[in-house]
Amino acid sequence: MYKEEEIVFYNGDIKLVGTLTLPKNKGRHPAIVMITGSGPLNRDEELFEFKPFEIIADHFTRHGIATLRYDSRGVGASTGNVFLSTLPDFSNDVMAAVHYLTNRSEINIKQIGLCGHSEGGIIAPFCASNSDDVAFIILISGVGQSGEKSFFTQNKLIMRADKVSEDKINEVLNLQKKMISQILEGDKETEIESILIDITKKSMNIERSDWNTDKQDLDNTILNQVTCQLTTYNSPWFNYFLNYDPKPKLEKVKCPVLMLFGELDLQVPYQLNKEIMVDALRKSGNKDYTVKVFPKANHLFQYAQTGSPTEYSKLEKKFVSGFLKFMSKWILKHVEIVNKG
């Protein structure tokens, strides 16, 4: 079949642990570093027992393409903390993975690409714009909007898909805008917590009059949810994300680019992001880019009904038809596969 190896590489003091898959044929193979989306995720980008990166890595390797996928900072045996890190840190992790591959005799160092999903689709262009060592990039639900705009867009679309009334949506969005304003101003944790409590109550259809405002009297579910969200919203990662605009880096990408979108993706709606990303690549003078939108696909490229994240756990743990084949076919047009045994 193919060889699978547990590997370790370093970005400074950060240890990153992952899996290297190598095609069975001898020789120097093209390779892809896989970049997970936001948050602490394992090397398979596992969510609700669905393991997208494990499936993609298996498919690529069977088609002659080596892959390297790794646990994000703070997951498994990898060190560091995702929320205390920012996009440049993650980009350096990726380039450390690329550097690791350049020291493997089984890898064609001129054919190392990146495959990023969601936030990984922001990190890949960041890396490619800064390094000639990246031969091509695949952006799965890549992001063109700024972090702040993305935050509001996805929240509005998800609430709409979950059949929240327009009045309630506007109430929640206004609270979120207030919260984001406080976050960007900095040092407002008390105010942010208060706003998050209001947002959580509104989202759960609980009116203020139903609750005592004393934190000790709040239901544990709400308090735990707010505490978890505070960890994210007060983090260096989230602050950087809000302020980051992916377009300038995309405008500097010269290597081949494949952009894949899901028609029902509410976290990264394809209409908005595709237009921005294509415009950026045109400005870069990059003519080797391909765009594909998969019908009825959600953010994880599963067949979906509405695209809401509330569906994820209920859907079949497989990709929409043609997703894997489209990627491998595109890659094989840009690399040389080792055919000798």
Image (cartoon, helix red, strand yellow):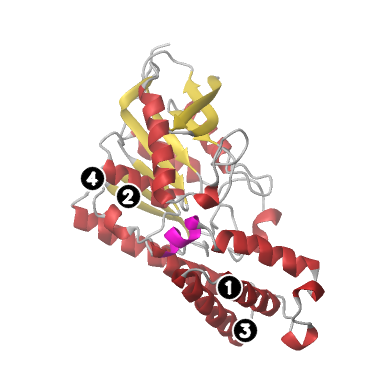
Q: Which residue is mark 4?
A: 254
Residue 29, x across and y down, in percent: 38, 22
Q: CA distance from mark 3 to mark 1?
A: 20 Å
Is residue 241 part of the magenta span, yes or no?
yes
Q: Observer-nearest residue: 290 or 181? A: 181
Position of 107 relative to 153 (above/below): above
Which quadrant of the structure image shows residue 184?
bottom left
* Residue at x 57%, y 47% (from the top left corner): 319
**Within-10-Å neighbours for mark 1: few <14, some 14–19, many 20+:** many
**In terms of secondary structure, where does tag 2 sit?**
strand
Secondary structure of the residue carrying tag 3 is helix
Q: Secondary structure at mark 4?
A: loop
Q: Earlier in the sequence, mark 1 or mark 4?
A: 1
For residue 93, the mark is none
Mark 2: give few (<14), some (14-19) or many (20+) Cα within 10 Å: few
Q: Please state which amino acid type lies under the numbered disc 3.
A: Lys
Residue 277 on image: x %, y %: 32, 58
* 179 left or right, relative to 206: left
Q: CA distance from mark 3 to mark 2?
A: 39 Å
Residue 192 numbered mark, or none: 1
Residue 311 falls in image quadrant: bottom right
Given residues 238 and 285, the one toward you in this image is 238
Residue type, mark 2 in image: Thr
Residue under pointer 2: 290
Check whether the beta carbons of the residues at disc 2 and disc 4 lie within 8 A of each other.
no
Pinpoint residue 112: horizontal percent, then vertical percent: 35, 31
Work out whether 327 lies above or below 307: above
Span colored in magenta: 236-242
Q: Which residue position is annotated with label 3?
A: 168
Q: Amino acid at mark 4?
A: Lys
- Foreground residue, 121 or 249? 249
Q: Nearer the viewer, mark 1 or mark 4?
A: 1
